[in-house]
Image (cartoon, rainbow, N blue to C red):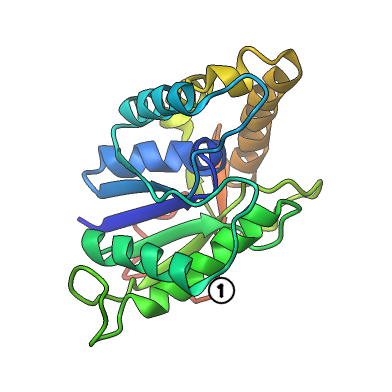
């Protein structure tokens, strides 16, 4: 089983972009840790305390652990300090696989977080540093889509989440201040289901989530392919 780290700029980004895959990986026995780079506040109806209750409930639904890094929402910057803090979490988790937001995005926090984690992947392998834990270099880095750009994803691969879609929606709705109470945001939940339905149709399943990779994926066999 693999140690998997899923970085999100704000609590709920992981659920929106790849919540079904997170659930599926946890069900398969992988050690999945969600790293929230910020607490996502302030928001119109939220508070730090309420947001924590929401992300805790979402993690329970998905069956995974969660950690808050503590960068400042709306002001995330690609700094050496942020890189090293992230590298420390990668080493503590001994991550084999990293997931980060797709690098093209309209949200500055999303772009900054992706750069931070990409560079922290390198920093995590360095020796003779003050970073906690043993050096490690995650073999895989994949990008999930939680983008604010109005464009259609062009993924490298898709993961079937037909059996996890309902729980993914439950995890999203755990963020009541973001997607239940604000009437204008309720449509987001519907859109995510429709988007995952479209992606599923591309591989002949009901629902799927898209991912992008810059590095070639190695296959030992075709047993895992959806045919």
- Does the image show residue 156? no
201 sits left or right of 91 in the view:
right
Residue 64: % across, % down: 29, 37
Residue at the image point whose x is 36% and y is 55% from the top: 5
Left or right: where 192 falls relative to 209 = right
Vertical comparison of 197 with 37: above or below: above
Q: Is residue 94 above or below residue 15?
A: below
Q: How many marks?
A: 1
The outermost residue toward the right is 150
Q: Residue at x 45, y 69 (%)?
A: 81
Q: State the residue in front, 85 or 222.
A: 85
203, above or below 218, in the image: above
Residue 214 horizontal/vertical position (percent): 56, 74
Question: Is the N terminus in the top left, top right, bottom left or bottom right quadrant?
Answer: bottom left
Residue for badge 1: 214
Give the crowd class for mark 1: few <14, some 14-19, many >=20 residues within 10 Å.
few
Answer with the quarter of the image where residue 49 lies. top left
Answer above or below: position of 132 versus 205.
below
């Amino acid at each position: 089983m693999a140690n998997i780290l899923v970085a999100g700029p704000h609590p709920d980004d992981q659920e929106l972009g790849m919540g079904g895959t997170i659930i599926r990986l946890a069900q398969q026995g992988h050690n999945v840790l969600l790293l929230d780079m910020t607490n996502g506040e302030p928001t119109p109806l939220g508070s730090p305390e309420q947001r924590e209750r929401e992300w805790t409930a979402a993690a329970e639904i998905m069956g995974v652990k969660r950690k808050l890094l503590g960068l400042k929402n709306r002001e995330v910057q690609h700094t050496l300090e942020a890189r090293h803090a992230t590298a420390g979490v990668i080493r503590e988790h001994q991550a084999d696989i990293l997931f980060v937001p797709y690098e093209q995005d309209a949200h500055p926090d999303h772009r900054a977080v992706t750069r931070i984690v990409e560079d922290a992947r390198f920093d995590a392998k360095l020796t003779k540093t003050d970073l906690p834990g043993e050096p490690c270099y995650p073999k895989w880095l994949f990008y999930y889509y939680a983008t604010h750009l109005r464009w259609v994803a062009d993924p490298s691969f898709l993961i079937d989440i037909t059996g996890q879609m309902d729980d993914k929606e439950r995890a999203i709705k755990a963020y009541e201040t973001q997607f239940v109470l604000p009437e204008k945001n309720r449509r987001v939940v519907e859109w995510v289901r429709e988007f995952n339905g479209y992606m599923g149709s591309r591989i002949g399943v009901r629902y799927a989530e898209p991912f992008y990779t810059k590095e070639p994926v190695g296959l030992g066999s075709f047993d895992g392919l959806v045919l």
